[in-house]
C-alpha cells in the first residue's frame, strides 16, 4: 500500500506544482469547509480515542480549519514565492546577467501526525496545509493514538480535494510504525514534517539523513521552555505568577509542547508554597496514550532519584496504570542543576514543572546556559527593570520569547515562529506554525538570461499575478 500511495504522490507532483495559486487556495478552503461540516462527528471520534475533552477538541477543529484558510491567503498573496528580479547590467564589473529567482515546490512530502493535537498537528494539520499550499503532494503517517480519527479525517480531506479539482494522489494516508520508517526512506519523498518525541524523531531524522539522497527532516522533538522570574517580579506578584504557572503547566494534563517545564525563581522568595497552593486546585486527568502515561512517573522518578529534586506537591511515584496523571511540582537548587544537567534538564512530558532556586544572577545565567534549545522562553520582570541582557540570553535559547504571560497556546499568524535550536527542532531556521511554514517545502531556482516564454508568470516583466517582487533591490508590485 505504501508504494502505491507514494507513486500516486509522485504522479501528482507536476500537476500540483503547475496549479495556480488560486486553485491551490481553493483546495485548502474546500478542505476547511468539509472539516467544519464534519466537526461533530470528528470530535466524537477524537474524544473517544484521545481522551481529550470535547470543548478542547471543538476549538482545535476551528484552529485547524483556520490555519487552512490562513495558508490559502498566503498563497493568494504571492509573497511566499520570494520573487526577485535583477535586470542585466552589462556595464557592471563583472558584467551582470539578467537574474530572476523564485521558490519552487520540493515534491511529495511525508507528514507525521502528533499525539497531543489530533487535528491541528495531524492528518489535516499545519504541515499538511503548508505543503499543499505550495504545490507539494502529501503522504500522512497517521498516529497510533487516534487511528480511527486519522482514517475518517483522511477520507474527508481526500474527498474535498477531489471535489475541488486537485490531482489524483495529491493526498494519501498510511498507518503503522513500519510504514512510517519506510515512508521516510521512500525514493519519491522529498521532505519530512514531524512532531513527536526526541527519541522517535531522532531515529527518523537519522533515516532521512542516511538515504542515498538525504532529504530535509523538519522535526519538532522536545522542549522544556524555561521561565525566569526576577527577584523584583517575585516580590511584587508571587501569588499571580504562581496561579499563572499552575494553570499553564497543567493545561491539557501537561501534554503541550510549550509547557513551562523549568522555572527559575530567586531563592527565599516564597514561591514554592504559593505554587503548591495553586497547583492543588488542578486535579489532573487522563493522558493521551498508555505509553505516555507509563513514561510520566518514570521521568519523575529519575528527576528525584538521580537528579536530587524534591517534591513540593504531588506524588512522583504515582500509579498511572489507569491512564491518568496528577500534577507534580518538583524543586531543586541551581547548583544541583549545574551538577546534573543531563538529568534535570530533560523534558518530562506530563503535568509537572521543576522549580529551580537561584541565589544570584550569575547562578541563574549559568543554568540558562546549560539549557538546550526550546520552543519558548519566558521572562517575568517588573517594568522598571533593565532586562535587555537577560532577554538576549533567552533569545539565544528559544524561537519565541515571551515577556509576561505563559507559553501554552500558539497563535496561528503570519509572524508566528514555532521552532527553536536543537533539541526543540532539527532546524532552527524554520517554523511549523504560521505563514512562513511553507518555506520548508520550497527550494530556490534562478533563471539566467531566460526567454520570457520559459519564465514562471511570477517572474515575467508585466507581473501578471500582481504579487510583491524585489526588482533591482526595491520591493514593489509593479511591472519591470
Image (cartoon, rainbow, N blue to C red):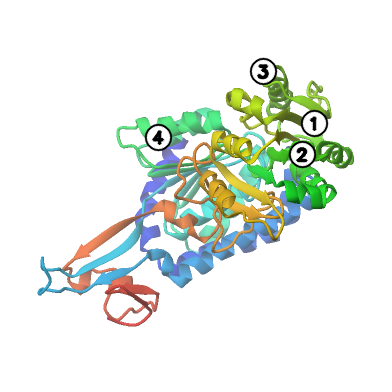
Residue at 43% across, 51% down:
440
Of marks 1 and 4, the one in the foreground: 1
Dot 4, crowdedness within 10 Å: few (<14), some or many (≥20)?
many
Q: Tell me residue 362's x, y (percent).
A: 60, 38
* Contact between labelled residues 2 and 1, with CB atoms less than 8 Å apart: yes
**Of 172 and 145, the residue lying toward us:** 145
Q: How much space separates mark 1 and mark 2, taking CA atoms?
A: 7 Å
Question: Pointer 1: what residue?
Answer: 325
Residue for point 52% across, 51% down: 128
Q: As rendered, which of 205 and 228 lies closer to the eye?
A: 228
Residue 24, percent across and down?
47, 64
Question: Are discs 3 and 4 less than 8 Å apart at CB?
Answer: no
Image marks 1 and 3: residues in contact by CB distance under 8 Å: no
Q: Distance between the residues labelled 3 and 2?
A: 24 Å
Front: mark 3 or 4:
3
Q: How far apart are marks 1 and 4 (CA)?
A: 35 Å
Residue 99: mark in rendering: none
Image check: 429 left or right of 327? left
Give the labeled residue for mark 3.
Answer: 306
Q: Which of marks 1 and 4 is nearer the N terminus?
A: 4
Instruction: Look at mark 2 in the image and give the residue it sits on.
Output: 253
Q: Mark 3 or mark 2, which has the lower sequence index?
A: 2
Q: Which numbered disc flags the more N-terminal residue, 3 or 4?
A: 4
Quadrant (top left/top right/bottom left/bottom right) for the C terminus: bottom left
Q: Which mark is residue 208?
A: 4
Assess disc 2: are there few (<14), some (14-19) or many (≥20) residues with their C-alpha within 10 Å of its C-alpha.
Answer: many
Q: Is residue 122 visible?
A: no
Residue 6 seen from this side: yes
Provide the secondary structure element on which disc 3 rests. Answer: loop
Amino acid at each position: 500500500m505504501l508504494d502505491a500511495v507514494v507513486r500516486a504522490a509522485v504522479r501528482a507532483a507536476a500537476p500540483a506544482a503547475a496549479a495556480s495559486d488560486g486553485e491551490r487556495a481553493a483546495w485548502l478552503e474546500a478542505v476547511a469547509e468539509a472539516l467544519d461540516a464534519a466537526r461533530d462527528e470528528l470530535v466524537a471520534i477524537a474524544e473517544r480515542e484521545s481522551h481529550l475533552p470535547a470543548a478542547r477538541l471543538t476549538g482545535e477543529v476551528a484552529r485547524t480549519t483556520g490555519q487552512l484558510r490562513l495558508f490559502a491567503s498566503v498563497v493568494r498573496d504571492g509573497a511566499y514565492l520570494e520573487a526577485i528580479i535583477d535586470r542585466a547590467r552589462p556595464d557592471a564589473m563583472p558584467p551582470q546577467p539578467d537574474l530572476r529567482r523564485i521558490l519552487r515546490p520540493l515534491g511529495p512530502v511525508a507528514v507525521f501526525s502528533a499525539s497531543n493535537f489530533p487535528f491541528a498537528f495531524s492528518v489535516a494539520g499545519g504541515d499538511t496545509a503548508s505543503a499543499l499550499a505550495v504545490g507539494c503532494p502529501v503522504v500522512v503517517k497517521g498516529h497510533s493514538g487516534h487511528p480511527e480519527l486519522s482514517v475518517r479525517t483522511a477520507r474527508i480531506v481526500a474527498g474535498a480535494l477531489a471535489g475541488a479539482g486537485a490531482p489524483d494522489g495529491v493526498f494519501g494516508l498510511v498507518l503503522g510504525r513500519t510504514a512510517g520508517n519506510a515512508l521516510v526512506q521512500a525514493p519519491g519523498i522529498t521532505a519530512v514534517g514531524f512532531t513527536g518525541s526526541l527519541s522517535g524523531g531522532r531515529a527518523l531524522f537519522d533515516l532521512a539523513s542516511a538515504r542515498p539522497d538525504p532529504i530535509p527532516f523538519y522535526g519538532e522533538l522536545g522542549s522544556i521552555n524555561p521561565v525566569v522570574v526576577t527577584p523584583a517580579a517575585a516580590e511584587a506578584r508571587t501569588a499571580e505568577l504562581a496561579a499563572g504557572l499552575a494553570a499553564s503547566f497543567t493545561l491539557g494534563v501537561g501534554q503541550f509542547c510549550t509547557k513551562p517545564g523549568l522555572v527559575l525563581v530567586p531563592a527565599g522568595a516564597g514561591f514554592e508554597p504559593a505554587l503548591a497552593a495553586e497547583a492543588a486546585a488542578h486535579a489532573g486527568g487522563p493522558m493521551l496514550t498508555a505509553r505516555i502515561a507509563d513514561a510520566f512517573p518514570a521521568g519523575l522518578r529519575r528527576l528525584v532519584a538521580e537528579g536530587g529534586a524534591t517534591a513540593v506537591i504531588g506524588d512522583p511515584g504515582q500509579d498511572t496504570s489507569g491512564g491518568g496523571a496528577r500534577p507534580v511540582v518538583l524543586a531543586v537548587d541551581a547548583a544541583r542543576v549545574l551538577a546534573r544537567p543531563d538529568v534535570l534538564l530533560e523534558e518530562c512530558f506530563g503535568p509537572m514543572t521543576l522549580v529551580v532556586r537561584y541565589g544570584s544572577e550569575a547562578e541563574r545565567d549559568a543554568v540558562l546556559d546549560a539549557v538546550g534549545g526550546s520552543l519558548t522562553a519566558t521572562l517575568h520582570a517588573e517594568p522598571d527593570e533593565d532586562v535587555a541582557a537577560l532577554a538576549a540570553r533567552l533569545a539565544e535559547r528559544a524561537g519565541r520569547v515571551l515577556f509576561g504571560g505563559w507559553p501554552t497556546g500558539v497563535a496561528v499568524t503570519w509572524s508566528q515562529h514555532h521552532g527553536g535550536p536543537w533539541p526543540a527542532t532539527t532546524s532552527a531556521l524554520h517554523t511549523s506554525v504560521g505563514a512562513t511554514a511553507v518555506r520548508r517545502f520550497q527550494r530556490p531556482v534562478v533563471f539566467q538570461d531566460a526567454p520570457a516564454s520559459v519564465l514562471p508568470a511570477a517572474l515575467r516583466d508585466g507581473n501578471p499575478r500582481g504579487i510583491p517582487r524585489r526588482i533591482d533591490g526595491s520591493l514593489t508590485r509593479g511591472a519591470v
